[in-house]
Image (cartoon, rainbow, N blue to C red):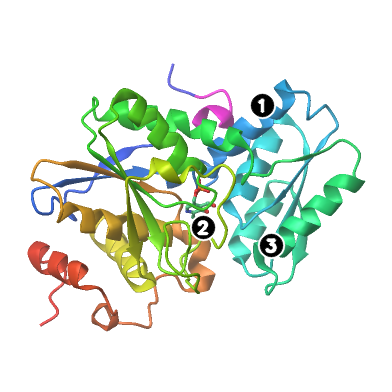
Amino acid sequence: MGYYESIRDIVGHTPLMKLNRLGPVNGVNLFAKLEYMNPGGSMKDRIGIQIIKEAEEKGELKPGGTVIEATAGNTGIGLALAAVIFGYRTILVVSGKFSEEKRNMMRALGAELVETSPEGGIDESIIVADEMAEKIPGAFLAHQFKNEANTRAHLVTGEEIWEDLDGKVDVLVAGAGSGGSISGIAKALKKHNPKIKVVLADPVGSILGGGDPGVYKVEGIGNHFIPEIFDRSIADEVEKVRDEDAYYMARIMALKEGVIGASSSGEALAAGIAQAYRSAPGTNIVMVFPDRADRYLSENIYHFEKELSDYDISDHIKRYEKDLKIYDRE
Ligand SMILES: Cc1ncc(COP(=O)(O)O)c(C=O)c1O
């Protein structure tokens, strides 16, 4: 029969979509793994379930316990969704820096929110979450940056990609925040075929892929520290991406493909395009699109006040635009 028994069964098995309007480019096929089709709107639904499941199995979380996490948003939503499924109290510590939509979504799923200052960012939230976990009996800290369950959740994501392309995967392009998704997907794919090239899409200003720390706007990816679970050696190459290219591509993907991926999806696409120009015709590039843009509308993700021609895009994106006649700047 064609129905699901629980929201849990709807997490994962997300669609892989070939971009037939924004590709092929240079004879290279572009595929997007639409993780925003998860019920909570991001790939973090997968890790919410995995983290709580493993904590229960290890006896770290017992009936009546409380799940605590410092989060920028998507992990909070994923954990809150999983806590509904498994029946736990959840406390999420969130900086005022992150969008109102994400905070409201966590509340809608029954999580209690503790707000930290916008200036303190995730670093302050981590300190507060650690303190709370020490005080509350039966507390379990999810700790996505240290918890290998995060990576394990994405072994399945990698298997899905492998199966959907019948193994014809040549390049994986993904960003990293905790590094859980790129590490898990890459491990699963490389187990099948060690020759698959893994490319880290990293914002200019993040140190994960090298370079000096700086300010960037893309949300969810990049970091100023190396998370414990991030296996840097898994990435064969790094594409440093400028904010402007990422936001531009997020807007273009909505306009041309109807894909409402947010800025980290735009970043993956910008990096995928750069790779396409360095790849042989016939190559299959898979890009991970982590979450939905509608949770950033209050942050003006689509810059509607701005013309497409006003974006300061990089040369390879200009070339792409010309090759595919995506938008005529003349
Ligand atoms: C929007 C978005 N994109 C990408 C990522 C990166 O995922 P990961 O933590 O698996 O590296 C995150 C993580 O929070 C995110 O929220």
Around disc 2, counting alpha carbons within 10 Å, would you say few (fewer than 14), some (14 to 19), or many (20 or more)?
A: many
- Circle 2 sits on which residue? 220
Q: Residue reaching furthest top?
A: 1
Identify which residue, 119 or 247, lies in the foreground: 119
The N terminus: image quadrant? top left
Q: Amino acid at mark 1?
A: Glu
Q: Is residue 327 left or right of residue 133?
A: left
- Would you say the beta carbon of the disc 1 residue lies within 8 angstroms of ligand 1? no
CA distance separating discs 2 and 1: 24 Å
The C terminus: image quadrant? bottom left
- From the viewer's perspective, is residue 141 above or below residue 1? below
- Identity of the residue drawn at 58% across and 27% down: 6
CA distance separating discs 1 and 3: 25 Å
Q: Which residues are magenta?
A: 4-12
Q: Which numbered disc flags the more N-terminal residue, 3 or 2?
A: 3
Residue 11 counted in the magenta span: yes
Around disc 1, counting alpha carbons within 10 Å, would you say few (fewer than 14), some (14 to 19), or many (20 or more)?
A: some
**Quadrant assignment, res 241:** bottom left
- Identity of the residue drawn at 37% across and 55% down: 201
- Circle 3 sits on which residue? 123
- Circle 1 sits on which residue? 54
Q: Amino acid at mark 3?
A: Asp
